[in-house]
């Protein structure tokens, strides 16, 4: 056991400040790593000494020198760290939340002086301004991850985001089409162009980007399998001039970053291969023949991106137009309006209701956690319970009020 070091001496200097030197470890060259504490009051000096000693005991000693502000570190994190894990759309969303919430509330605070109460105050401000709890939770997750990286790099001695309760966010009620409604939607697509687009959505539960990014090279109609290696997303243009061009929108910047429709890795990096039901394979074969006719008609105007679902000139479908087509389809089918992503929920609930094993459903949908898939099983259980309750009410509505108490009456007679 190493000898316990004496408590550092605190002295009042000629400059009117209190000074102390704290040994927090050893430098790579073997010399003692001492930190100079300089505070206006003795109590402040003691507080800083105790903080450094606590860091020494836990082995989480921050780097020497002045720590960056929260805003400075978040900019470093979003520029140099997060892009290795997140796609550009996610980074854009993170920057938006930083500009709107983190920087105004915490930006000027030194990273190593950030307090848990400051995070609590920011989340409370978001709540008072009517922001959804899920919005505050996302901001909390951004801060937690950024501070965790700062902790690993010795910029802070603790991750204060982990010292408070995360904002609670209620899970939105899952919406989906019933089996009858799904069949009605598919019946309505019979004479529509790209009708197989909606069969794929309701049969395989692909995310919109996965369906629009699907290419024929990844579809094997002989073996009945489809690979999902990419998804099509609209990437937002960002400034490439570091904000010096004076234009508000990144799309108007002369040095704007690459944007528009791009192929990126699927969500959660859930690249996967899934089976195609025989009826869907037949529909896709017919769809490919129809697309070849369009290619011949377009002639030199055809832009061959090998997309399964494309515009009449071969270009990929725009996600916004695709969503509007879904809205129009639901209206034409005469069923309730649900989000396009709810077609994925519909596929999942129908698979579970048909008895497909949850592990199989997990693979088809590309979930990283089985608990997400189990959520659909709970929905199906609730629907089953509602159905049996309605049936019970229908069958027993004329039995009279004493039927439910029959067993108790029998027990009383026996007594």
Image: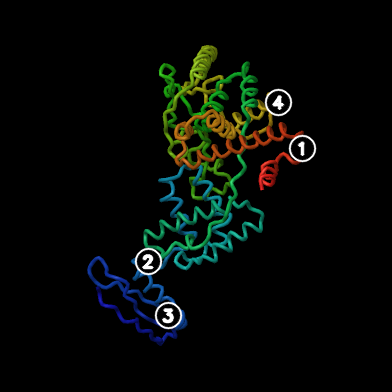
- Report the residue marked by disc 2: 62
The dot on residue 292 is none
Which comes sooner in the sequence, label 1 or label 4? 4
Instruction: Name the front one of labels 2 and 1.
Output: 1
- Report the residue marked by disc 3: 46
- Report the residue marked by disc 4: 334
Classify the position of the N terminus by image quarter.
bottom left
- Residue shown at the point (62%, 23%) measured from the top left: 183
Instruction: Name the front one of labels 1 and 4.
Output: 1
The dot on residue 400 is 1
- Mark 4 is surrounded, within 10 Å at the Cα level, by few (under 14), some (14 to 19) or many (20 or more) other residues, namely few
Residue in front for this viewpoint, 263 or 163: 163
Marks 4 and 2, how far apart at CA = 62 Å
- Mark 1 is surrounded, within 10 Å at the Cα level, by few (under 14), some (14 to 19) or many (20 or more) other residues, namely few
Judged from the image, the secondary structure of the residue bearing numbered disc 3 is helix
Marks 1 and 4, how far apart at CA = 39 Å
- In the figure, 75 relative to 23: above or below? above
User: Is 264 placed left or right of 402 in the picture?
Assistant: left
User: Is 391 placed left or right of 1 in the picture?
Assistant: right
- In the figure, 67 relative to 408: above or below? below
Which comes sooner in the sequence, label 4 or label 2? 2
Q: Position of residue 338 (x, y in %)?
A: 64, 34
Which comes sooner in the sequence, label 2 or label 1? 2
Marks 1 and 3, how far apart at CA = 79 Å
Residue in front for this viewpoint, 367 or 196: 367
Q: Quadrant of residue 15?
A: bottom left
Judged from the image, the secondary structure of the residue bearing numbered disc 4 is loop
- In the figure, 404 relative to 9: above or below? above
Which comes sooner in the sequence, label 3 or label 4? 3
């Amino acid at each position: 056991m190493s000898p316990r070091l004496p408590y550092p001496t605190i002295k009042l200097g000629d400059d009117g400040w209190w000074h102390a030197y704290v040994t927090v470890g050893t430098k790579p060259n073997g010399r003692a790593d001492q930190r100079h504490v300089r505070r206006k009051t003795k109590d402040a000096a003691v507080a800083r000494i105790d903080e450094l000693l606590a860091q020494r005991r836990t082995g989480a000693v921050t780097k020497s020198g002045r720590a960056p502000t929260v805003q400075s570190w978040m900019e470093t994190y979003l520029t140099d760290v997060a892009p290795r894990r997140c796609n550009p759309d996610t980074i854009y969303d993170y920057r938006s939340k930083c500009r709107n919430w983190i920087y105004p509330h915490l930006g000027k605070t030194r990273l190593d002086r950030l307090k848990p109460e400051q995070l609590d105050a920011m989340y409370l401000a978001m709540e008072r301004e009517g922001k959804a709890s899920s919005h505050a939770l996302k901001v909390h997750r951004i801060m937690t991850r950024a501070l965790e990286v700062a902790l690993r790099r010795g910029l802070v001695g603790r991750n204060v985001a982990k010292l408070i309760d995360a904002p609670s966010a209620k899970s939105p009620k899952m919406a989906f089409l019933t089996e009858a409604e799904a069949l009605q939607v598919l019946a309505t697509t019979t004479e529509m162009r790209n009708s197989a687009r909606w069969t794929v959505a309701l049969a395989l539960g692909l995310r919109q980007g996965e369906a629009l990014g699907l290419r024929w090279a990844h579809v094997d109609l002989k073996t009945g399998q489809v690979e999902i290696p990419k998804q099509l997303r609209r990437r937002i243009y960002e400034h490439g001039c570091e904000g010096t061009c004076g234009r508000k929108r990144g799309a108007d910047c002369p040095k704007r970053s690459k944007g528009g429709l791009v192929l990126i890795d699927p969500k959660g990096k859930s690249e996967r291969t899934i089976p195609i039901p025989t009826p869907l394979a037949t529909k896709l074969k017919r769809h490919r023949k129809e697309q070849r006719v369009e290619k011949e008609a377009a002639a030199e105007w055809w832009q061959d991106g090998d997309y399964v679902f494309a515009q009449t000139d071969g270009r990929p479908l725009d996600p916004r137009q695709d969503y509007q087509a879904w809205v129009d389809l639901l209206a034409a089918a005469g069923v309730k309006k649900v989000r396009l992503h709810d077609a994925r929920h519909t596929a999942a609930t129908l698979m579970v209701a048909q008895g497909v094993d949850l592990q199989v459903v997990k693979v088809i949908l590309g979930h990283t956690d089985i608990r997400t898939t189990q959520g659909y099983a709970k929905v199906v259980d609730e629907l089953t319970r509602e159905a049996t309750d309605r049936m019970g009410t229908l069958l027993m509505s004329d039995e009279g009020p004493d039927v439910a108490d029959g067993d108790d009456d029998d027990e009383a007679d026996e007594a």
